[in-house]
Amino acid sequence: MDTTTIAAITAAAAFFGGTVVYFFTRDVQSDLIIYDDDLRAMGLLRERDKVAEIFLMKNEDKRISFAKDQYAKAEDAKEVYDEDMQELEAAIERLNNSLNPIIESISSQGSQGQEEIMSQTKFTRPFMKLTDHLAQLSMKLNAYALECSKSRFFENVKQGYGKDTVIENMVEKSDGQTVVVTKFDPFLKAQMKSMELKMDTQEKIHERFLSEK
C-alpha cells in the first residue's frame, strides 16, 4: 500500500475508534446525570445547576469537597431563615391577638355605618398586615424547605454515596415525594385557621348589621 492509502486507513480507524469511545463515554456519563424527575422528587429542581451533574466529577475528593462547601452554605441559610421565621411568628401572634378586641369593638357598634367606620379605621390595616406576614412566612417556609433538601442531598454526597444511593436516601419510597417537615407547619396552619375565622367573623358582623336594618 502506498503512503496515501495507509494514511487514509489510519484516519478512518481513528475516526471510528473515536466515535465508539464517544458513544460509550456518553452512555456512561448519562447514567451519572440526575434528571428532572429525580430532581423534582428530591425538591431540588431549582438547584439543577449545582446538583444535576455533580456525579460527573471524576475526582471523588473534589466532589466531596464541593458537597461539604454546599452543605455548609445550606446549613447557614437554614439558620438565617429560622431566625426570620421566628420573628415573623412573633409578629403574627401579636397582630392576631390585637385583632380580637377590635372585632369585639366592631360587634358592639349600634349601626351599620358605625360598624363600617370601625372596620375601616381599626380592622382593615392590621388585618392586611397580618395576611402580608402570613404570606412572607409561607415564602420563608418554602425557602427553608429548599435549604433542607440541599442540606440533606449534600450531606449524602459528602459521605461518599453514589447517585442511586443518594436519590434513594432522599426520596420516600412510598410516594416518591420529598420528605421535608418543618416545625413551623403546625404554627402556620393554626394562624391560617385563625385568619379564616376572623374573616368569617367580619362577614357575620356585616350580615348582622344589615339584617337589623
Image (cartoon, grey):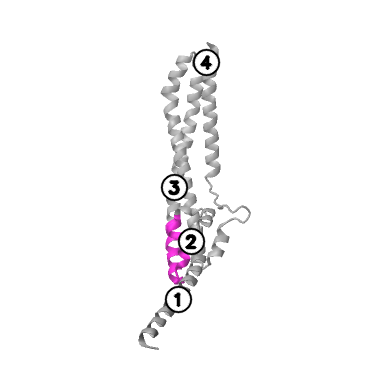
Residue at image position (52%, 66%) is 31
- Tell me if residue 167 is in the magenta stretch: no
Q: Residues within 10 Å of mark 2 (few under 14, many from 20)?
A: many
Q: Which of the two residues, 103 or 125, is positioned nearer the viewer here?
A: 125
Q: Amino acid at mark 4?
A: Phe
Q: Which of the two residues, 38 or 138, is positioned nearer the viewer here?
A: 38
* Image location of residue 95, percent across then percent down: 46, 33
Q: Amino acid at mark 1?
A: Phe
Instruction: Describe residue 152's horizontal placement relative to residue 8 as left or right.
Output: right
On residue 83, the disc is: 3
Residue holding disc 4: 209
Mark 1 vs mark 2, CA separation in Å: 39 Å
On residue 16, the disc is: 1
Mark 3 vs mark 1, CA separation in Å: 60 Å
Mark 1 vs mark 4, CA separation in Å: 87 Å
On residue 154, the disc is: 2
Q: Which residues are magenta?
A: 47-74
Mark 4 vs mark 3, CA separation in Å: 43 Å
Residue at image position (43%, 36%) is 132
Q: Secondary structure at mark 2?
A: helix
